[in-house]
Image (tube, coloured by chain):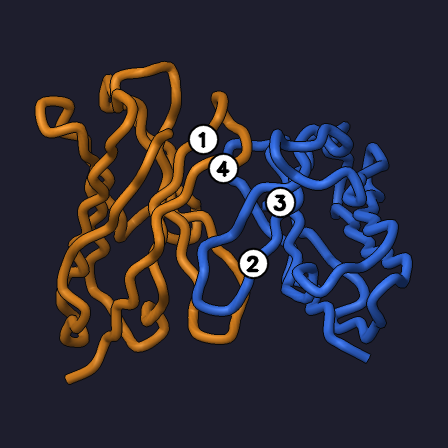
Chain colours: A blue, B orange
Amino acid sequence: DIQMTQSPSTLSASVGDRVTITCRASQSISIWLAWYQQKPGRAPKLLIYKASSLESGVPSRFSGSGSGTEFTLTISSLQPDDFATYYCQQYNSYSRTFGQGTKVEIK
Amino acid sequence: QVQLQESGPGLVKPSGTLSLTCAVSGGSISSTNWWSWVRQPPGKGLEWIGEIYHSGITNYNPSLKSRVTISVDTSKNQFSLKLDSVTAADTAVYYCARDRETVSYFDYWGQGTLVTVSS
């Protein structure tokens, strides 16, 4: 299986901050990476696919970049609704795997 | 708008079989999409369990393959999960989800259902 490692595990930030989350793959996955947002008690919500493509309806303050083994999710100006846990997911192989998650907390 | 809804027992005894069904509405399960199960133990991350195409072709997570069966009922527009020989480690919220494309990411999710393995 391809292992996905996110950093940091927890991030404390304030409204208006620029936030960056990193996801590293144990082997090259080209651009086959998605990002999700999950709030407590809710299902994950797709934000980004193909490393940098913004899902329809997702605010433009979210952006993704990277290829190969290193990827980033950036929130350009953190909003109150963005405090949540974020997961990356690779789909380079049929056995899909997720990162362990990054919790974005209020500072 | 595609909607998915999980259903099934919330409590399963150790060594028993976990059985869940996902009803799909607002779209056909016979479309070109694949349909997956994903689980999340309390307070932990997400784990992909497996997927099925409307023809019955399946792919499973190698770590669960020996215990998992996913099936589809196109007449009822639903698909199902069976997990055998469960232990407390299988306690999780189980989600069904739609793969946007073959071997891809998940664009629609059910609300999830908590299954607890306990005697």
Q: Nearer the viewer, mark 2 or mark 1?
A: 2
Mark 2 neighbour class, 10 Å CA radius: few under 14, some 14 to 19, many 20 or more? some
Q: Is B96 located above or below residue B106 in the figure?
A: below
Distance from disc 4 to disc 3, alpha carbons, whole Å, reads: 10 Å
Distance from disc 2 to disc 1, alpha carbons, whole Å, reads: 18 Å
Circle 3 SS class = strand
Which mark is on residue A38? 2
Query: What residue lies at 70% left-to-right and 28% top-to-bottom?
Result: A50
- Residue under mark 3: which chain is it in? A
Please name the amino acid that badge 2 sits on.
Gln
Q: Nearer the viewer, mark 4 or mark 3?
A: 4
Q: Which residue is mark 1?
A: B99
- Residue under mark 2: which chain is it in? A
Q: Quadrant of residue A16?
A: bottom right
Which mark is on residue A89? 3
Circle 2 SS class = strand
Please name the amino acid that badge 1 sits on.
Asp
Q: Nearer the viewer, residue A65 or B63?
A: A65
Q: Nearer the viewer, mark 3 or mark 2?
A: 2
Distance from disc 1 to disc 4, alpha carbons, whole Å, reads: 5 Å
Circle 4 SS class = strand
- Marks 1 and 4: CB-CB under 8 Å? yes
Q: Position of residue A78 (x, y in %)?
A: 81, 59
